[in-house]
Amino acid sequence: MALINNIDYAPIIYTVGYIFTILSLSSTKVITLRVFYWISTLDFIIYGMYIGKTEIILWSLFAFAVNSYQLICYPFFESTLFFSEAQLSIYNKVFRKYMLPGNFRQLIKIAKDKSASDITLIKENSENKDLYLIYQNYNAKIIVTHSGKEIAQLPIYSFVGDMSFISGCRTTCTVQSHGDISYYHWSGLQLERLKERDIDTYNKLLFMVSYDLVQKIIKSSPYEIVSIPNQNKE
């Protein structure tokens, strides 16, 4: 018993803290890294209390608090927790391949959820910086016209305004709904603000809208798109 009482626990506590710090730095998963770092900072708080060093306690408490906050926020960024049924359906069918739930939350936070009947979303040869996503059409037809002629009909989960959003040029066609639709509407101002404060979410949106546009062009092309063989290959 006397031997146990004579043990200096400070080096042991300090060593355990650094072991968990090294484990956190060795982890490739963010959640594992934060859990290990959370344990290490808690250990350093105990160490500071044991040796009576206020500065170690305070700095460790600060690191502990910041990391605890990130741990609490992490499930909200990584999971679809608190999505409505409609939002979960839209995320799974449109956004899941391109972004995390947290990115999608940022997008729907700045979007206006609207419903309308027989509406013109964009007009040909006009200035447009807004972006739309049609997520419900109630059997309505979404008609795309160019120079007064119908050139396509958009299916559900289609972006509208994607060409002008990507290029910054005037619109090349008119998009109208014949019937009731529900859609998300992002204003150009909100998208610019998103670009400034959350470039990761903005870039992911830009990529998926670009991909959506390419798919529309391929499907509307009257020509078969084939790969070109390598002429240098023997």
Image (tube, rainbow, N blue to C red):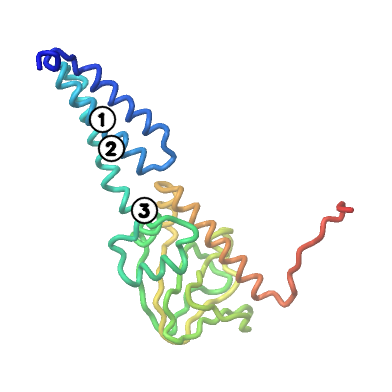
Q: In this view, does 93 lie to the left or right of 221?
A: left
Q: Residues within 10 Å of mark 1 (few under 14, many from 20)?
A: many
Q: Distance between the residues labelled 2 and 1?
A: 9 Å
Q: Residue at x 23, y 22 (%)?
A: 13
Secondary structure of the residue carrying tag 3 is: helix
Secondary structure of the residue carrying tag 2 is: helix
Which is nearer the eye, 112 or 208? 208
Quadrant where the N terminus lies? top left
Could you tell me the amino acid type at mark 1?
Thr
Per the image, the residue denoted by label 1 is 41
Residue 176, percent from left and from top: 50, 80
Q: How crowded is mark 2: few (under 14 residues within 10 Å), some or many (20 or more)?
A: some
Q: Residue 100 carries which label?
A: none
Q: In this view, does 12 lie above or below 110?
A: above
| Mark 2 or mark 3, earlier in chain | 2
Location of residue 105 by image quarter? bottom left
Residue 93, percent from left and from top: 46, 69
Could you tell me the amino acid type at mark 3?
Glu
Marks 2 and 1 close (CB-CB < 8 Å)? yes
Per the image, the residue denoted by label 2 is 67
Q: In this view, does 11 lie above or below 131?
A: above
Secondary structure of the residue carrying tag 1 is: helix
Per the image, the residue denoted by label 3 is 78
